[in-house]
Image (cartoon, grey):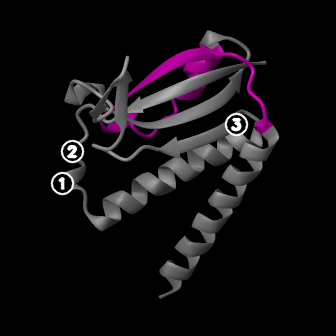
Amino acid sequence: MENYMLMLRADEIDFSSYSPADYQRILEDFDKWNAAMISENRLIASANLKTGQGRTLKGTTVKNGPYSEAIEVITGIFLIRASDYEDAVKIASGCPFLSRGGSVEVRLVPTLEFENVALEMVERDIKNRAQKAAVDGAK
């Protein structure tokens, strides 16, 4: 297995029009996608990136903002295991952003250190979200 990075871009997703229920649905869709990848030992790590925050360094210059065009905004990353690019693209095709107008870039990355530690953290986060959803649903 090789490691691949999935870089998620919101592209044409208008989150400002999302209701709390819409946000909950997308979180649940991501939890299902994550759980499927975890059950197949494919997910190494994932993270959301804060929109509009970051710094870009070029030489000795530091600029506010991680991007030059709004369309280039990377909103999340996933590190996955796949046998080849075709397999990685198949996994990426399950991303909940795709059906909502977003995109996913798939890139091969070198072998990473500490993969098992990251996987345990993701599993713990999914369990915490599921418990929170159950408590919130019982209210």
Return the disc, 3 or 2, that comes first in the chain's sequence: 2
Residue 79 percent across, percent down from the top left? 62, 31
Indicate the amino acid at tag 2.
Asp
Across and down, in percent, residue 9 comes to 36, 31
Q: Which dot marks residue 17?
A: 1
Q: Where are the magenta residues, as a range?
A: 87-115
Tag 2–tag 1 contact (CB < 8 Å): yes
What residue lies at 61% left-to-right and 11% top-to-bottom? Answer: 85
Q: Which residue is mark 3?
A: 44
**Tag 1: amino acid:** Ser
88 within the magenta span: yes
Residue that label 2 marks:
14
Q: How far apart, in angstroms, are the residues tagged by discs 3 and 2? A: 28 Å
Residue drawn at x 21%, y 45% is 14
Q: Which secondary structure, mark 1?
A: helix
Residue at screen point 50% across, 56% down: 28
| Left/right of residue 34 with respect to residue 52 in the rendered view | right
The amino acid marked with disc number 3 is Ile
Label 3 or label 1, whichever comes before in sequence order: 1
Q: From what the image shows, is residue 136 above or below residue 36? A: below
Under tag 3, what secondary structure?
Answer: strand
Say few, some or many: other residues with alpha carbon within 10 Å of mark 3 (under 14 / 14 to 19 / 20 or more).
many
> Separation of disc 3 and disc 1 at Cα?
31 Å
